[in-house]
Image (cartoon, helix red, strand yellow):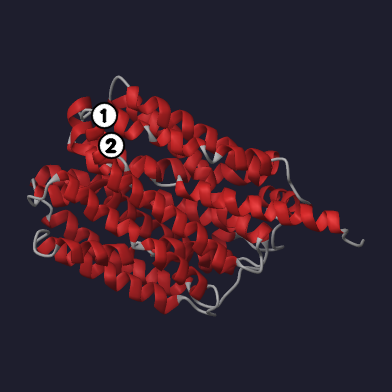
């Protein structure tokens, strides 16, 4: 069948819409979490929340992402990838809009979980959108939405405290404003939900039936397990950083707005680095040593904080910002390790959902250790040590192998 000029123009418009949707969805993948860190002390006081429960709150993303991630392929089969992401965006907007007005800790956590369930769908399915819509530009497009993700994370971290101040010190309005930002992404995905191509439908069927690569069971694949462990350990580090890094700096004597800016640096660095890293990693046959080098930056950052957070806070923020680039790296590896979109649907769901299950205990343990010791030495030593298995898993996941 010959493609007409009208078909070509329609395809071009859909690709442009997909780019817009990717960027807007990615921008909203982190503010639900990063807006909390800088005002966590105020949230705890307002809700009567202990440090251990606050640690539980920082683990809620991992729980939601794990549970909802396993359901993402089935939802994508029924509603299409675009429809599933649109559904997730609605959940995100509702959760963020209602959460600030929660009457207690339980309802606050429940509404946070609703918002994060929406994010979980996009977390799993955005790599699939890249594979489906841009199979010849996997590294570049992964880099693009990683840039948007880091911009969203850093913006929320940097401006939530000033916004709270502008609203008369009301943290509820300071974090509630991010619902409006999330709502901007909804129209693009509502339109994309109507544009479900044959390759997307086939990928959805394969993700549910397990037919992506005949004879391949992900639970028996060393590559899939290496990706899952690497994803889980980098998620542990990411959510500890997002949930607790501002508090580490505040406990070291730095003011709240400075602590928020320092955290925003860790996310802001990912803006240029994520794009360059993903685009470069996408052209490499192996990403193993990239994962090791990134892990060494993380080890140095945690070691510096363990020694004295106030000694060189900007340096430590930069080191951890580089370490956070493990996230776009693992997304790129997931897309590269699968031979086609059908396999990537399954691999993304498996690696992310299993990885987030692995990540659940970390932030809770960090919060419990902080409350028990009254300081950060033990939690930071633990995080530094966890970089070792993360580097090993990253080395194994980055080898030039494909599933199938």
Depth order, front residue of 51/321:
321
Report the side of 262 relative to 340 (left or right).
Answer: left
**Camera-side residue of 310 and 382:** 310
Q: Residue at x 8, y 64 (%)?
A: 311
Q: For the point 64% across and 44% down, which residue is it?
A: 82
In the image: residue 262, left or right of residue 352: left
Helix, strand or loop status at disc 1: loop
Tell me how far mark 2 sits from mark 1, CA to CA.
6 Å
Which numbered dot is residue 250? none
Residue 133 location (% of width, % of height): 67, 58
269 over 121 or under it: above or below: below
**Up-down relation of residue 217 to residue 239 (above or below):** below
Image quadrant where one finds the N terminus:
bottom right
Whether pointer 2 and pointer 1 mark residues with C-beta atoms closer than 8 Å, the reply is yes
Q: Which residue is mark 1?
A: 167
Residue 163's mark?
A: 2
Mark 2 neighbour density, 10 Å: few (under 14) some (14–19) many (20 or more): some
Q: Looking at the rendering, in which quadrant would you find the C terminus?
A: bottom right
Q: Quadrant of residue 387?
A: bottom left
Residue at point 52% right, 65% down? 332
Tell me if 20 is positioned left or right of 192 in this view: left
Quarter of image, res 379: bottom left
């Amino acid at each position: 069948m010959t493609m007409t000029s009208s078909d070509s123009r329609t395809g071009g418009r859909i690709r442009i819409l997909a780019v817009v949707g990717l960027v807007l969805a990615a921008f909203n993948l982190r503010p639900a979490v990063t807006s909390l860190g800088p005002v966590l002390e105020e949230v705890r006081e307002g809700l009567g929340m202990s440090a251990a429960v606050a640690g539980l709150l920082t683990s809620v993303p991992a729980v939601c992402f794990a549970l909802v991630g396993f359901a993402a392929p089935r939802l994508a089969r029924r509603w299409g990838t675009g429809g599933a992401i649109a559904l997730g965006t609605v959940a995100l907007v509702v959760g963020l809009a209602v959460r600030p007005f929660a009457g207690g800790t339980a309802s606050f956590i429940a509404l946070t979980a609703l918002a994060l369930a929406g994010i979980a769908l996009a977390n799993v399915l955005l790599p699939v959108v890249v594979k489906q819509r841009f199979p010849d530009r996997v590294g570049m497009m992964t880099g693009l939405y990683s840039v948007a993700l880091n911009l969203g994370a850093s913006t929320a971290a940097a401006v939530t405290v000033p916004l709270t101040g502008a609203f008369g010190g009301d943290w509820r309005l300071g974090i509630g404003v991010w619902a409006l930002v999330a709502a901007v992404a909804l129209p693009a995905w509502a339109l994309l939900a109507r544009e479900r191509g044959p390759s997307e439908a086939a990928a959805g069927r394969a993700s549910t039936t397990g037919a992506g690569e005949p004879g391949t069971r992900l639970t028996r694949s060393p590559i899939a397990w290496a990706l899952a462990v690497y994803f889980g350990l980098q998620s542990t580090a990411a959510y500890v950083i997002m949930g607790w890094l501002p508090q580490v700096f505040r406990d070291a004597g730095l003011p709240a707005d400075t602590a928020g800016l320092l955290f925003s640096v860790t996310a802001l660095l990912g803006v240029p680095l994520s794009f360059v890293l993903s685009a470069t990693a996408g052209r490499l046959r192996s990403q193993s040593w990239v994962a090791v080098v990134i892990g060494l930056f993380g080890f140095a950052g945690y070691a510096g904080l363990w020694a004295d957070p106030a000694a060189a806070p900007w340096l430590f923020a930069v080191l951890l910002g580089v370490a956070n680039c493990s996230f776009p790296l693992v997304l790129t590896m997931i897309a590269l390790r699968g031979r086609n979109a059908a396999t990537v649907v399954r691999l993304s769901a498996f690696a992310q959902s299993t990885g987030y299950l692995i990540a659940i205990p970390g932030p809770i343990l960090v919060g419990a250790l902080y409350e028990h010791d009254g300081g950060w030495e033990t939690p930071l030593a633990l995080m530094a040590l966890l970089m070792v298995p993360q580097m090993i898993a990253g080395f194994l996941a980055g080898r030039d192998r494909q599933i199938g």
